[in-house]
């Protein structure tokens, strides 16, 4: 595509109310320039989950992640302080910590053996005697902002991002009565989809619109007519009463309680809560037409006695995910067609998607404006 980014951004009217609104246009899903801009303005400038608090609960425990193309390491220091750093050695840029998670007394680069303390300070640089004007104090790991909410560790790459508490708004108060801190991690499953990350988020935020047509099992336990959508500043809550059903016994046995709650936090984090069951979905872009979705499964009871039922619950989720994968990949193919530009939104169902698109447009337009200002300064 050769159209200037500003023109492609202007194809979407973020001021339109829901009853007049359309989706973001197809080029936003397929043009590689949008993927680059999203790395810079969406994923690098908002709070993004990178792991679980239990992974870094004890001294020396660490986890690694990658956000917006940046390798990161989060570690619990000897002083019990949680810190995050760019996982990039200051010598020749190799990853310092290569395991997904673990425990270490020091952070040691496997390339040339440079060693850092748990506080990020440079402790050892082998065979560096005689190097002039080398200040060890200035060669520690570069820090990144980190914060914890409930069981989740978040990072923000930009120093000017608001505090996590401000970003979350009233979400902690809404979630607190659900007691998710008492639900324990069970297992993770990763899914790679041949679609843009935004396609997956759109699918999640369509207010259950696709559920009766695509997810027959899940639909059997949701009271679809009473499905509700509530938007806040940075999150959306979709919720439905649960109903007893003998139509799909495996789903009804693993999706119980009075109500299902589906929280989405901008830009890419979902929390799905039933009675004694929770799973989280983290959607990470890999390319304009590929994304990774990390599913973490949690249960109130993770004892050996509950393992069979928990595994059955994961299997139900797996089948639902297979259905979503197929439709999301179909959508991605359609977005590349000359027959499609943008689609209208359902007032009854797609308020969450409308919120997502407006927040995304805000961040991307800010990014393009900043680039234009930089060009003007260079030309002066």
Image (tube, helix red, strand yellow):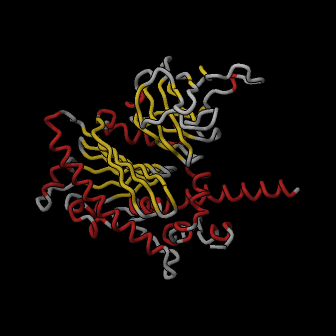
Instruction: Find the residue positioned furthest to the bottom.
Output: 339
Dividing the picture into quadrants, the one containing residue 138 is: top right
Where the N terminus falls, by quadrant? bottom right
Dividing the picture into quadrants, the one containing residue 14 is: bottom right
Which residue is at a point 21% across and 50% down the rendered structure image? 255
Where the C terminus falls, by quadrant? bottom right
Q: Is residue 131 above or below residue 242?
A: above
Which residue is at a point 16% across and 54% down the rendered structure image? 252
Q: Is residue 65 above or below residue 10?
A: above
Instruction: Please tell me which residue lies in front, 334 or 161.
Output: 334
| Res. 38 visible in picture | yes
289 to the left or right of 259 = right
Measuring from the top left, give residue 346's x and y in whole percent. 42, 70
173 to the left or right of 336 = left
Measuring from the top left, give residue 136's x and y in whole percent. 68, 22
Dividing the picture into quadrants, the one containing residue 217 is: bottom left
Measuring from the top left, give residue 116's x and y in whole percent. 56, 24
Measuring from the top left, give residue 194's x and y in whole percent. 42, 64
| Res. 352 visible in picture | no
């Amino acid at each position: 595509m050769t159209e200037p980014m500003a023109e492609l951004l202007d194809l979407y009217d973020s001021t339109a109310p829901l009853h007049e609104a359309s989706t973001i246009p197809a080029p936003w899903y397929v043009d590689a320039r949008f993927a680059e801009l999203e790395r810079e303005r969406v994923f690098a400038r908002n709070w993004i989950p990178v792991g679980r608090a239990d992974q870094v609960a004890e001294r020396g425990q660490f986890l690694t992640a990658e956000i917006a193309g940046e390798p990161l390491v989060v570690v619990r220091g000897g002083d019990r302080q949680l810190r995050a750093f760019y996982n990039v050695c200051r010598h020749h840029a190799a990853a310092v910590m290569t395991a997904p998670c673990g425990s270490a007394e020091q952070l040691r680069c496997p390339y040339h053996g440079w060693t850092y303390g748990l506080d990020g300070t440079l402790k050892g640089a082998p065979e560096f005697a005689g190097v002039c004007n080398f200040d060890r104090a200035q060669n520690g790991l570069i820090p990144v902002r980190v914060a914890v909410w409930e069981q989740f560790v978040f990072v923000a790459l930009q120093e000017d991002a608001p505090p996590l508490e401000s970003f979350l708004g009233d979400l902690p108060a809404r979630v607190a009565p659900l007691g998710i801190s008492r639900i324990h991690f069970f297992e993770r499953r990763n899914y790679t989809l041949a679609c843009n990350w935004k396609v997956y988020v759109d699918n999640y935020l369509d207010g259950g619109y696709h559920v009766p047509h695509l997810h027959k099992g899940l639909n059997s336990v949701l009271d679809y007519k009473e499905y509700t959508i509530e938007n806040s500043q940075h999150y959306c809550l979709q919720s439905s009463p649960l109903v007893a059903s003998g139509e799909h016994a495996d789903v009804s046995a693993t999706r119980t309680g009075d109500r299902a709650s589906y929280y989405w936090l901008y830009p890419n984090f979902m929390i799905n809560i039933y009675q004694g069951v929770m799973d989280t979905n983290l959607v990470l872009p890999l390319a304009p037409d590929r994304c990774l979705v990390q599913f973490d499964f949690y249960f109130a009871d993770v004892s050996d006695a509950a393992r069979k039922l928990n595994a059955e619950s994961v299997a139900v989720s797996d089948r639902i995910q297979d259905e979503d994968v197929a439709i999301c990949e179909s959508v991605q193919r359609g977005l590349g067609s000359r027959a499609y530009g943008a689609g209208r939104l359902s007032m009854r169902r797609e308020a969450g998607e409308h919120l997502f698109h407006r927040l995304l447009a805000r961040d991307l337009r800010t990014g393009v404006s900043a680039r234009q200002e930089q060009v003007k300064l260079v030309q002066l």
